[in-house]
Image (cartoon, rainbow, N blue to C red):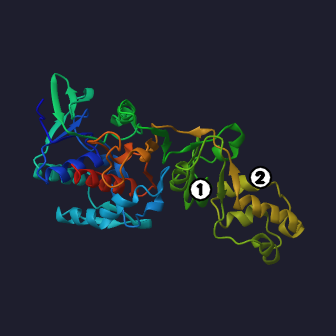
Amino acid sequence: MTATHDAIVLGAGAAGLMCAGAAGQRGRRILLVDHNPAPGAKILISGGGRCNFTNIGTAPDRFVSANPHFARSALGRYTPADFLALVEAHGIAWHEKTLGQLFCDGSARQIVAMLIAECDRGGVEQALGVPVSAVDQADGLFRVTLGSRVVTAPRLVVATGGPSIPKLGATSFAYDLARRFGLKIVEPRPALVPLTLGAEEALFRTLSGVATEVVASAGAGRFREAALFTHRGLSGPAILQVSSYWRHGDSVALNLLPDQQGGWLRAAKREQPRATLRRALGRQLPDRLAEALADRIAITTELANTPDRALESAERLLSAWTVTPTGTEGFAKAEVTVGGVSTADLDQRTLEAKRVPGLHVIGEAVDVTGWLGGYNFQWAWASGVAAGQAL
């Protein structure tokens, strides 16, 4: 059997486009395949349509993985500065927002157009809107069936992502294919996703629409950003961040007054003895939240008539208000997936399967998940280039 291509890349998302372009420009005959009729579906909706395409603070410790060191090689060899240089070479205007996040001034469509142009520059052949009906391997070649067409190559790249945002066509295809080739899967879970609360947390569920800056903690994750109370539970950047670390049954701690030091309520008692707890909280928190917290803590007397031990207890509650989510809003609302193809089965430099020569897995399909704020795109670009240079 003669190979029709040097490599077949399954998935025309961020990682797949990057990989195909990098390999094509090295003179490889690349076929880029996707069941969606157009490439870059997730890119187009990211960053409110402006694509938070990288983060200048990218570092391996800002990724969740069973092997926290795995991403170091690819991230070190293709940096945010490298991708930014590509963006600027294509004349795409950009700006930096908070916490090192870089966005297009215009539209995320510019990033997709750039990646397609890079693929065109490398002579990449595209087969879009075509589902894969079969994948097998024989005689050193991968054989992929696309409807009535069969294509073959000595190398196959799996860049089909995880199951987050199924309305964009996301599936567990990558995991199913990896299992067929004997690769282990770290349990996939929704990540960067709102958390749901039960009836016992009615205090917060009645505050739908209220937002405040907190320090949220769950597992090894600790983030200071905004939290948003919703009719179903908790959302906002701080909550999305800790959701990647949260496990079912775990609690989430919220420091609702992250700028306050211990003893602040006793100080308020000295300075404004006639004030109530509700009034003291109202100076620092949204009114509805201040009222709800004061009602729950149930200190109704003026501060002058409240024992110090009661004020200290209130401070402890407010600095570590603990809730136990009932779950998440699932893959439908998750921006990415935690877990995926085990890094133990992949070479960290080439993303090639150790026991299946020629098979590479990149991007979100791998058990590497970044923080909110452009990190996952940087992993897509870096892992795509790492595999593309190895094809």
C-alpha distance separating marks 1 and 2 = 31 Å
| Residue 89 x, y percent position in the rendering | 17, 65
Rendered location of residue 260, percent (x, y): 68, 70
Callout 2: SS: helix
| Closest to the observer, 157 or 313 | 157
Name the disc covering residue 220, or none: 1
Q: Quadrant of residue 41?
A: top left
The answer to whether 112 appears left or right of 341 in the picture is left
- Mark 1 lies on a secondary structure that is loop
Along the viewing direction, whichever of 172 and 308 lies nearer the viewer: 172
Q: Residue at x 39, y 39 (%)?
A: 162
Residue 97 is labelled as none
Instruction: Estimate the x, y position of residue 188 in percent, counting from the top left.
Output: 48, 39
Residue type marked 1: Ala
Q: Is residue 61 left or right of residue 279?
A: left
Look at the image and tell me in which quarter the N terminus lies: top left
Q: Is residue 90 visible?
A: yes
- Residue 27: x and y in percent read 11, 51
Residue placed furthest toward the top: 148
Q: Residue at x 11, y 52 (%)?
A: 121
Label 2, on which residue?
295
The quadrant in which residue 386 appears is: bottom left
Q: Is residue 50 visible?
A: no
Q: Residue flagged by tag 2: what amino acid is it?
A: Asp
Pick whichever of labels 1 and 2 is earlier in the sequence: 1
Residue density around tag 2, few if under 14, some if 14–19, many if 20 or more, within 10 Å: some
Residue at x 78% of width, y 61% of height: 314
